[in-house]
Amino acid sequence: MQPQRSSWKRKVAGWSLLTLGVAGLILPLLNGTIFLLLGLFVLRDQHDWSRRCLDWCDRRWPGQMGRLEKLEAKAADRFHNSSRWVRRKLGRA
């Protein structure tokens, strides 16, 4: 995986997911664990502490982080292909 620059959009998304996760630990309507893990995953390239938490998760549940990274790569590829399709349809390709 390539190291990424600091991105304010990723930080906002990650911190929002972490906030939802904390709220989900208190409120019965949300599953806080999922939001916490997603927030950590989004922030993994932005903060060292997030990477350390995910490394712990990878040691605790081996193989799951690899599956999550493959899923992220697949989603990024689909997004890239769909944005290329939209640009082509708009005549901006």
Image (spheres, grey):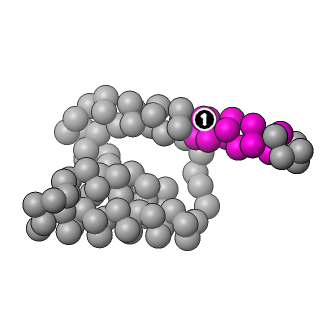
7 to 63, vertically: above or below? below
Q: Can residue 45 be seen from the camera position used here?
A: yes
Q: Position of residue 87 (x, y in %)?
A: 80, 45
- Of helix, strand and loop, which one carries label 1? helix
Residue 16 located left or right of residue 24: right
Q: At 29% across and 39% down in the image, what residue appears?
A: 58
Q: Position of residue 11 (x, y in %)?
A: 48, 67
27 to 92, vertically: above or below? below
Classify the position of the C terminus by image quarter: top right
Q: Which residue is nearer to you in this view: 41 or 76?
A: 76
Q: Main secondary structure of the magenta part?
A: helix
- The residue furthest front is 89
Q: Can residue 50 be seen from the camera position used here?
A: no
Q: At 47% across and 70% down in the image, what residue appears?
A: 12
Q: At 10% across and 60% down in the image, what residue appears?
A: 28
Q: Position of residue 43 (x, y in %)?
A: 43, 59
70 to 28, vertically: above or below? above
The residue that mark 1 highlights is 78
Residue 47 located left or right of residue 37: right
